[in-house]
């Protein structure tokens, strides 16, 4: 059994990886691409050898599910269009740029009886899954603290545009780590402190940030969400978790599985990852759930919770005090 | 003229300082006092120092010019002040004291006695941290935007119970994080505000703290300090600045690795990582400055300011609030 899946927009840096994953998954029929930037869409369709649809409707008519790789601010519009045609949605992260948009997306999908998923590929890492199982089995004892890092290079494009992206590094990277912490610990974020700064790229949005989270269980965590990796760094960035339990301390480095390539031809040194393709695993799990009629593994509420952490970080940086998540909901 | 050194305390720090001083040109370790004579015996044997029954007697000894205070943190004030009042120069292990009031008393006592006071912030003598300082100062790196520093050890309280009592030791913040707080002051100057989180397990000596320290404009600093590194001591930092990034990981830089059957390391193969250990570099510099009548690199006031920053971290962690920083004069 296969699912007909389309891809909306190549605005996001992850779009190309998503397209490659869609081509490789045997349970997926990759029916094509729609892009509001026609030139970008043509190039992507040619690269991946799939049809380019001139209108969103044309793509949605042929799909059972779409993956959104547009700017963050456009997720809501595309989700509403898909839901109105009974098409399931897997949205790139962050789910949206405002709480109002995130709630609207969750509500419209529920009303249309389609599923809404969010792209948090960190949950598809075998190392992260092993950590979650070890925690659930009590092998680490009670978890007291987590230090998460998700530093990267500045992605460019619209990622530094406050309107299109909803913010800078804190919007881009916080959500991965915040979601993973919730999922690993089965916990909720109660309070957020953040120091943010725009230091390196002359952007209106922050490129540097450290968040500190108080968890509902009483534990705490920090997240380095900075676009701090220099252009000469051998890879785009990374994701790590340092987990302190009462019985054991665990380090997970999600992208550690890589060859160091000293590349004379390119005049640089770079890491060549050989670990599992997390995007492919994540999309496969989403598709399998839709085909089986099960709830998707990472739903809109998970996207909303992670977004709340990022938005609380902005309020904290602005007010220079820790911010309760409950304040955002009031 | 030979500088005669007395060692107070024969734990990890005391033994290290005794060993470091012993063999330095123009320096003699003449006396050692610890909680018990048995504890002092290995240091006495290695350095030729005589064992003295208690701290007061060591301070009163006529063959001691400088006292190394390496007793548990809460005793630093009593011992450093006794040494100063006996007219001895003082080299005090970090933290300078457990409380700011005690630190002030030590500084005042040394000033009044006209003796030198140096504080053992040894990271300033570690070449990897010095290299970063040099590259910050000479413009190679450009302005720093973010620095993350980490330092961990096994739960040391399991070996030395006084660490378990925060009233005596100040816990992982005053023991471990203080090194990185001092480093950050040395690299970047005085920060603007602090936010921190801390946990102490009910048993087992497990402690862990995270602090975020903001400077005016930049950089943002994040420090991790852990007594949950069961594999043992490690340090690391990442320093991102305008022109690039420095990365240090102590686990990745050992030039000498031994494997032997059964996991035991032959005792004779102590890891020879540097020609001169940072601890000996520190003492050599401190003692030379004292002999020349110069101020030590990390003097009492400098040690006091770093202690105050550590106490501000504790204040933030306990109150859950952002603490605005202004350094003591």
Image: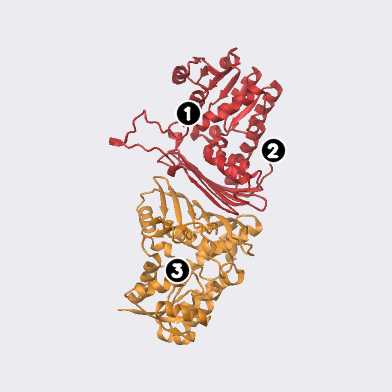
Chain colours: A orange, B red
Of the numbered discs 2 and 1, the one sitting upstream in the chain is 1
Residue B56's spot in the image, x, y percent?
58, 17
What numbered label is drawn on residue A218? none
Q: Report the front residue among B228 and B141.
A: B141
Categorize mark 3 by other alpha carbons within 10 Å: few (<14), some (14-19), many (20+).
many
Seen in the picture, residue A177 relative to B111 is either above or below; the reply is: below
Q: The N terminus of chain A appears in which quarter of the rendering?
A: bottom left
Q: Report the front residue among A192 and A276.
A: A276
* Residues at circles 2 and 1 in contact by the CB criterion of under 8 Å: no
Q: Can residue B44 be seen?
A: yes
Which SS class for mark 3? loop
Which SS class for mark 1? helix
Q: The C terminus of chain A appears in which quarter of the rendering?
A: bottom right
Q: Left or right: B19 with respect to B115?
A: left
What numbered label is drawn on residue A119? 3
Q: How many marks?
A: 3
Q: Name the front one of labels 2 and 1.
A: 1
State the residue position of label 2. B328
Q: Can residue B199 be seen?
A: no
Residue B231's spot in the image, x, y percent?
40, 41
| C-alpha distance separating marks 2 and 3 | 49 Å
Do tags 3 and 1 sit on the same chain?
no
Residue at figure coordinates x 57%, y 19% from the top left: B26
What numbered label is drawn on residue B12? 1
Seen in the picture, residue B189 relative to B292 is either above or below; the reply is: below
Do tags 2 and 1 sit on the same chain?
yes
Query: Image quarter for residue B25?
Result: top right
| C-alpha distance separating marks 2 and 1 | 30 Å
* Residues at circles 2 and 3 in contact by the CB criterion of under 8 Å: no
Check the residue under mark 3 and report the chain it is in: A
| C-alpha distance separating marks 3 and 1 | 50 Å
């Amino acid at each position: 059994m296969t699912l007909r899946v389309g891809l909306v927009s190549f605005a996001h840096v992850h779009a190309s990886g998503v397209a490659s994953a869609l081509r490789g998954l045997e349970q997926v029929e990759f029916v094509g691409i729609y892009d509001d930037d026609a030139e970008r869409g043509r190039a992507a369709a040619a690269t991946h050898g799939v049809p380019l649809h001139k209108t969103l409707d044309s793509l949605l008519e042929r799909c059972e599910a779409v993956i959104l790789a547009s700017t963050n601010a456009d997720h809501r519009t595309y989700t509403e269009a898909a839901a109105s045609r009974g098409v399931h949605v897997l949205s790139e992260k962050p789910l949206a740029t405002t709480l109002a948009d995130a709630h609207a997306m969750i509500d419209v999908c529920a009303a249309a009886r389609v599923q809404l998923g969010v792209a948090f590929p960190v949950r598809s890492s075998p190392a992260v899954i092993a950590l979650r199982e070890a925690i659930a089995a009590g092998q680490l004892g009670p978890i007291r603290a987590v230090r998460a890092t998700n530093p990267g290079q500045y992605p460019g494009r619209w990622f530094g545009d406050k309107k299109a992206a909803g913010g800078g590094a804190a919007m881009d990277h916080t959500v991965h780590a915040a979601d993973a912490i919730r999922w690993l610990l089965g916990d909720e974020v109660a309070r957020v402190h953040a120091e943010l700064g725009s230091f390196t790229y002359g952007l209106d949005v922050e490129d540097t940030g450290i968040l500190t989270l108080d968890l509902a269980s009483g534990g705490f965590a920090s997240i380095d969400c900075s676009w701090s990796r220099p252009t000469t760094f051998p890879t785009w960035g990374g994701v790590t978790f340092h987990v302190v339990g009462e019985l054991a301390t665990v380090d997970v480095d999600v992208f550690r599985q890589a060859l160091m390539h000293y590349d004379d031809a390119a005049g640089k040194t770079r890491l060549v990852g050989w670990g599992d393709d997390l995007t492919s695993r994540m999309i496969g799990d989403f598709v399998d759930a839709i085909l089986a009629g099960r709830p998707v593994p990472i739903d809109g509420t998970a996207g909303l919770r992670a977004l709340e952490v990022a938005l609380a970080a902005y309020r904290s940086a602005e007010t220079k005090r820790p911010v309760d998540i409950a304040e955002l909901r009031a | 003229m030979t500088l005669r050194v007395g060692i107070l305390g024969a734990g990890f720090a005391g033994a290290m300082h005794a060993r470091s001083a012993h063999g330095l040109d123009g320096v003699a370790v003449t006396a050692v006092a610890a909680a018990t004579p048995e504890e002092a015996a290995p240091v006495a044997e290695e350095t030729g120092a005589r064992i003295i029954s208690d701290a007061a007697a060591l301070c009163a000894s006529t063959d001691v010019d400088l006292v190394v205070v390496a007793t548990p943190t809460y005793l630093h004030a009593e011992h450093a002040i006794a040494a100063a009042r006996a007219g001895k120069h003082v080299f005090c292990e970090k933290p300078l004291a457990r409380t700011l009031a005690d630190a002030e008393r030590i500084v005042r006592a040394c000033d009044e006695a006209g003796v030198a006071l140096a504080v053992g912030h040894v990271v300033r003598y570690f070449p990897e941290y010095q290299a970063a300082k040099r590259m910050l100062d000479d413009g190679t790196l450009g302005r720093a935007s973010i620095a993350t520093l980490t330092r961990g050890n096994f739960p040391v309280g399991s070996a030395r119970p006084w660490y378990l009592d925060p009233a005596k030791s100040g816990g992982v913040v005053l023991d471990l994080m203080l090194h990185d707080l001092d480093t950050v002051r040395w690299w970047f100057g005085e920060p603007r505000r602090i936010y921190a989180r801390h946990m102490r397990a009910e048993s087992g000596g497990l402690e862990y703290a995270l602090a975020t320290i903001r400077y005016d404009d930049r950089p943002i600093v994040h420090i991790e300090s852990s007594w949950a590194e069961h594999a043992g001591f490690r340090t690391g930092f990442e320093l991102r600045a305008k022109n690039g990034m420095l990365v240090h990981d102590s686990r990745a830089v050992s030039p000498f690795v031994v494997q032997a059957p059964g996991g035991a390391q032959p005792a004779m193969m102590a890891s020879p990582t540097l020609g001169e250990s940072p601890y000996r570099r520190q003492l050599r510099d401190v003692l030379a400055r004292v002999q020349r009548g110069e101020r030590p690199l990390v003097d009492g006031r400098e040690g006091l300011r770093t202690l105050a920053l550590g106490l501000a971290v504790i204040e933030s962690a306990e109150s859950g609030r952002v603490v605005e920083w202004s350094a003591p004069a």
